[in-house]
């Protein structure tokens, strides 16, 4: 994102890109901006829900084979952004759907975004461990699970997104808590250290098009 262009980008996203994606069957989970104290800024992250790879193939066909609208959108981005990077995400086995999140009243207003470098070919083991061990601990202590995913075409990357239930107050509560007595957390940390090489996390703040607010 070019500094000073965030509002223009959000307007264009709402008026041009989101309708194109919706027409192609993609469901917007959230559009966030990065919070500058924790992640490079200015950047945006959009999370879209698709049914399967067949659904993605239809979306890609619309984007690259036939659509003048998508070509116009990419051309317009040149005045607002310096580049972008996309991923196909494969969710954890019991990852909540957008409908699940809506039904549960989850707000994605303030979230933690984690991107993890795992040992080669261990990304699904890491995703399964997050769901079994870390997710229950996180939910007990004020986080809501948006999702944990491995990434296609990479054998060493996983991503987790967590909504903070009380917003900024959850952030303060989480980092002031002593976790040493939690058996689940201890078990997960032992497993996680063996599966990952590093992780980077930071805060995301929801922009206007986000339906989970």
Image (tube, rainbow, N blue to C red):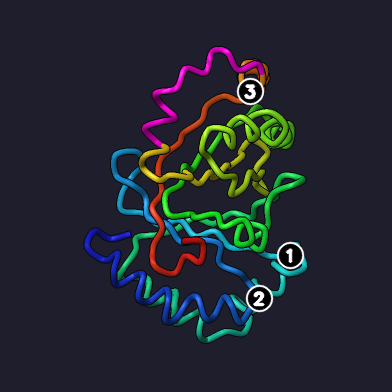
First of labels 2, 3 by sequence position: 2
- Contact between labelled residues 3 and 2, with CB atoms less than 8 Å apart: no
Q: Identify which residue, 28 or 52, lies in the foreground.
A: 28
Residue, disc 2: 25
Q: CA distance from mark 1 to mark 3?
A: 29 Å
User: Looking at the rendered structure, which numbered label has been put on residue 192?
Assistant: 3
- Contact between labelled residues 1 and 2, with CB atoms less than 8 Å apart: yes
Label 2 packing within 10 angstroms: few (<14), some (14-19), many (20+): some
Q: Residue furthest top?
A: 180
Tell me which residue sits at (61%, 82%) in the image: 23
Residue, disc 1: 51
Label 1 packing within 10 angstroms: few (<14), some (14-19), many (20+): few
Q: Tell me which corner region of the image, top left, top right, bottom left or bottom right, holds residue 135.
A: top right
Q: Position of residue 182 (x, y in %)?
A: 60, 17
Q: Quadrant of the N terminus?
A: bottom left
User: Looking at the rendered structure, which numbered label has been put on residue 195?
Assistant: none
Provide the secondary structure element on which disc 2 rests: loop
**Above or below, comparing residue 68 to residue 31 in the picture:** below
């Amino acid at each position: 994102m070019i500094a000073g262009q965030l509002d223009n980008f959000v307007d264009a996203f709402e008026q041009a890109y989101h309708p194109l994606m919706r027409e192609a069957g993609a469901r917007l989970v959230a559009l966030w901006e990065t919070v500058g104290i924790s992640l490079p800024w200015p950047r945006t992250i959009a999370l879209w829900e698709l049914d399967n790879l067949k659904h993605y193939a239809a979306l890609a066909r619309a984007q690259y084979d036939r659509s003048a609208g998508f070509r116009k959108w990419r051309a317009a981005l040149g005045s607002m952004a310096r580049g972008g990077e996309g991923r196909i995400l494969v969710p954890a086995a019991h990852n909540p759907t957008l409908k699940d999140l809506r039904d549960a009243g989850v707000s994605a207003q303030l979230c933690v975004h984690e991107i993890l470098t795992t040992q080669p070919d261990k990304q699904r083991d890491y995703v399964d461990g997050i769901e079994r061990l870390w997710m229950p601990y996180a939910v007990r202590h004020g986080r809501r699970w948006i999702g944990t995913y491995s990434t296609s075409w990479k054998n060493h990357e996983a991503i987790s997104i967590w909504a903070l239930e009380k917003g900024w107050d959850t952030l303060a509560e989480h980092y002031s808590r002593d976790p040493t007595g939690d058996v689940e957390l201890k078990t997960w940390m032992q497993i996680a250290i063996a599966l990952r090489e590093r992780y980077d996390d930071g805060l995301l703040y929801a922009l206007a098009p986000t339906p989970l607010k």
